[in-house]
Image: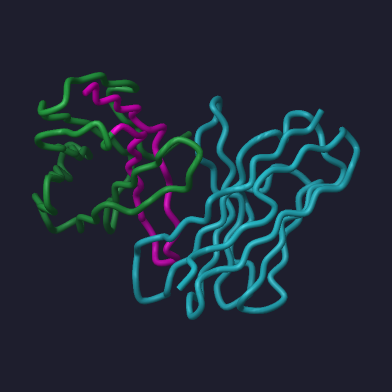
Chain colours: A green, B cyan
Amino acid sequence: SQQGEEDPQALSIQEGENATMNCSYKTSINNLQWYRQNSGRGLVHLILIRSNEREKHSGRLRVTLDTSKKSSSLLITASRAADTASYFCATDNNAGNMLTFGGGTRLMVKP
Amino acid sequence: DAGVIQSPRHEVTEMGQEVTLRCKPISGHDYLFWYRQTMMRGLELLIYFNNNVPIDDSGMPEDRFSAKMPNASFSTLKIQPSEPRDSAVYFCASIHGGGHEQYFGPGTRLTVT
């Protein structure tokens, strides 16, 4: 089964609104990453948060991590139509740089 | 750098045929990963290499699948014989051992009829 599970599976919002996506995982982790995938493209790394961090920012992205609840959230503020994509969380729980990806959240931002 | 390069971008083949997917990682990256993405199963890790050596192939679905990395700049994923259920998008990704961010190629969309 997948380590990370995103919620919701799909999200539709208006441009300018904030988008929040959640990820839950099952086992202890070293770090958690978020990736974006535009339709028909490969995944692109967005942000990494380590297991000893609780919050991290990068531009309009804000990621939180709660290791006690084994969950993370990705917030995209002031969304744009160009943010339309699928977003995946991925966990790294060993030293081999192997990632386990969740099922993804499909975000649609309407102009 | 050109990024991770995959070829072909699209492959349509008939059941029973051999399929070979190719990947060129980013220069200097010492980890290479092969993934398969489908609507039903999401993104699955098939196998990964470190310094050209296969480390974990537990995700390879069955003996019909094989992967090689003869040198640091080239890897292949072969399916022989192919079946319709192998239809998916296959991604290659690479990282430098000192980092965590995986760099993905554009993928190969495989259709087996």
For the point 31% across and 30% down, the residue is A6
Q: Tell me the quadrant of the picture where the C terminus of chain A can be found.
A: top left
At which x and y percent is residue B83? 81, 33
From what the image shows, is residue A16 above or below residue B98? above
From what the image shows, is residue A34 above or below residue A16? below
From what the image shows, is residue B20 above or below residue A61? below
Which of these two is toward me, A8 or A2? A8
From what the image shows, is residue A82 above or below residue A62? above
At which x and y percent is residue A110? 24, 21
Determine if the magenta segment contains residue A94.
yes
Determine if the magenta segment contains residue B98.
no
Q: Quadrant of residue A14?
A: top left
The answer to whether residue A55 is left or right of residue B40 is left
The part of the chain drawn in magenta is A84-111
At which x and y percent is residue A20? 17, 30
For the point 40% across and 66% down, the residue is A95
For the point 20% across and 40% down, the residue is A72
Q: Quadrant of residue B39?
A: top right
For the point 31% across and 38% down, the residue is A25
At which x and y percent is residue B80? 85, 47
Question: From this viewpoint, which residue is outermost toward the right?
Answer: B16
